[in-house]
Image (spheres, rainbow, N blue to C red):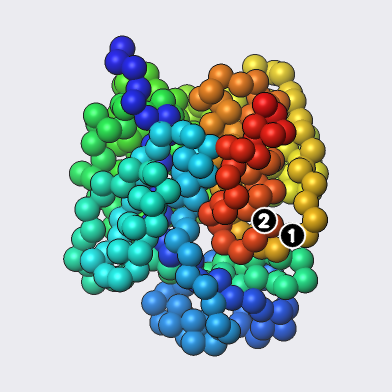
């Protein structure tokens, strides 16, 4: 078997984030649930953008954020996602490549613009409330998936958010088959509770078929996947269906279960939480890089916690500090 030239290749939404501060009164006024994520129509996105305060534009997208973090930790990565032939498409393409991540998906001339996520951040606790307009991201074609490129990576990472639209769903199914045929691992981030509510049967079918090797889910997501309110019951349910389960618990740290062996770590201490956007994405980055480096699950969890702590210490979902140096200082 040919030795992989990449560590991680990911398929996800190509999104530019627009972040602005907002209090709970603003969220309530516009029908938002604090800390949640919802999808917007084009008209809703325009209306909310007009009502938001002054913001910052920073490229995002869950899987793309994970790759930016992984690249900062020294991993070789590539991203597959759809942008339109517009200004935000150029911004996203420039930003992802500037992190050292390969991005070869061609922009398309589409009736909808490049995706954007309008993120309201609470100044008091840093909690982010996300409002996403998928735009061009939902038009990723199955033909955009190349077997040789998928086979070139040790791990294929799939973003659960992208399971909603039909074309990207078929693209990811095709990529799974390619990865499995090449003997590569597949990781799935379920992304959000609403993704599970919409596609629980699909996700469980992937697990039952052995198509997923690593499953990332936070506490709320693993409860939704298992259909229970008991955390330990939910963890047992998920761990029985996937070789490696990774579950984050916010300030309570994270756990990993593989082959019946469970390890856990505490959250990394931080002076102040500024913006929780990207915390789960960067956790996945640290864990996956530790995994491809052959580290133990406990050390990989620590790497995830270190990366997550860095990203919530500032605005935006991409790391600003040198993650590789932070990990080296704490883990060696």
Q: Nearer the viewer, residue 199 or 295?
A: 295
Report helix, strand or loop for mark 1: loop
Secondary element at image label 2: loop
Residue position marked by numbered label 2 in the rendering: 312
Q: Quadrant of the C terminus?
A: top right
Q: Is residue 246 left or right of residue 115?
A: right
Q: Nearer the viewer, residue 275 or 116?
A: 275
Q: Quadrant of residue 239?
A: top right
Are circles 2 and 1 on residues that touch, CB within 8 Å? yes
Please state which of residues 278 and 112 is positioned toward the viewer in this rendering.
278
Cα separation, mark 2 vs mark 1, equals: 6 Å
Q: Residues within 10 Å of mark 1 (few under 14, many from 20)?
A: some
Q: Residue furthest top?
A: 1
Tell me if residue 133 comes above or below residue 227 in the rendering: below
**Residue at (36% x, 40% y) in the render:** 78
Q: Does the image show residue 215?
A: no
Residue displayed at 47% across by 40% down: 71
Residue 290 figure quarter = top right
Upstream in sequence: badge 2 or badge 1: 1
Quadrant for the N terminus in the image? top left
Residue sitting at x 55%, y 71%: 19
Tally of numbered discs: 2
| Residue that carries the numbered disc 1 in the rendered image | 273
What is the x, y in percent for residue 326?
65, 40
Check disc 2: other Cα within 10 Å, few if <14, some if 14-19, many if 20+: many
Q: Position of residue 128 (x, y in %)?
A: 64, 65
For image coordinates 61% across by 38% down, the residue present is: 325
Residue 135 on image: x %, y %: 35, 67
Res. 104 mark: none
Q: Is residue 239 left or right of residue 96?
A: right
């Amino acid at each position: 078997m040919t030795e992989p030239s990449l560590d991680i290749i990911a398929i996800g939404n190509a999104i530019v984030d627009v972040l602005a501060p907002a209090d709970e009164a603003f969220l309530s006024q516009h029908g938002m649930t604090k800390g949640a994520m919802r999808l917007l129509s084009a008209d809703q996105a325009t209306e909310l953008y007009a009502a938001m305060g002054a913001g910052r534009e920073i490229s995002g997208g869950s899987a793309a954020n994970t790759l930016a973090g992984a690249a900062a930790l020294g991993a070789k990565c590539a991203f597959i996602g759809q942008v339109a032939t517009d200004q935000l498409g150029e911004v996203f393409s420039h930003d992802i490549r500037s992190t050292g991540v390969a991005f070869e998906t061609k922009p398309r001339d589409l009736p909808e613009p490049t995706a954007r996520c309008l993120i309201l951040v609470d100044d008091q606790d840093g909690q982010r409330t996300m409002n996403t307009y998928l735009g061009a991201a939902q038009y990723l074609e199955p033909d955009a998936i190349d077997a040789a490129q998928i086979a070139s990576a040790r791990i294929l990472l799939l973003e659960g958010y992208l399971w909603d639209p039909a074309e990207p769903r078929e693209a990811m199914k095709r990529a799974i088959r390619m990865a499995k045929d090449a003997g590569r691992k597949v990781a799935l981030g379920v992304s959000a509770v609403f993704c599970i509510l919409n596609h629980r049967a699909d996700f469980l079918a992937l697990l039952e078929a052995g198509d997923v090797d690593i499953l990332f889910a936070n506490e709320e997501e693993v409860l939704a996947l298992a259909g229970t309110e008991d955390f330990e019951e939910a963890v047992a349910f998920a761990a029985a269906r996937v070789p490696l389960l990774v579950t984050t618990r916010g300030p309570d740290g994270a756990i990993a279960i593989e082959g019946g062996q469970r390890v856990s770590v505490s959250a990394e201490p931080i002076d102040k939480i500024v913006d929780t956007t990207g915390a789960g994405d960067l956790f996945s980055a640290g864990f996956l890089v530790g995994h491809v480096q052959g580290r133990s699950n406990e050390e990989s969890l620590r790497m995830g916690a270190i990366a997550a702590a860095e990203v919530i210490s500032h605005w935006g979902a991409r790391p600003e500090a040198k993650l590789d140096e932070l990990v080296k200082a704490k883990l060696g």
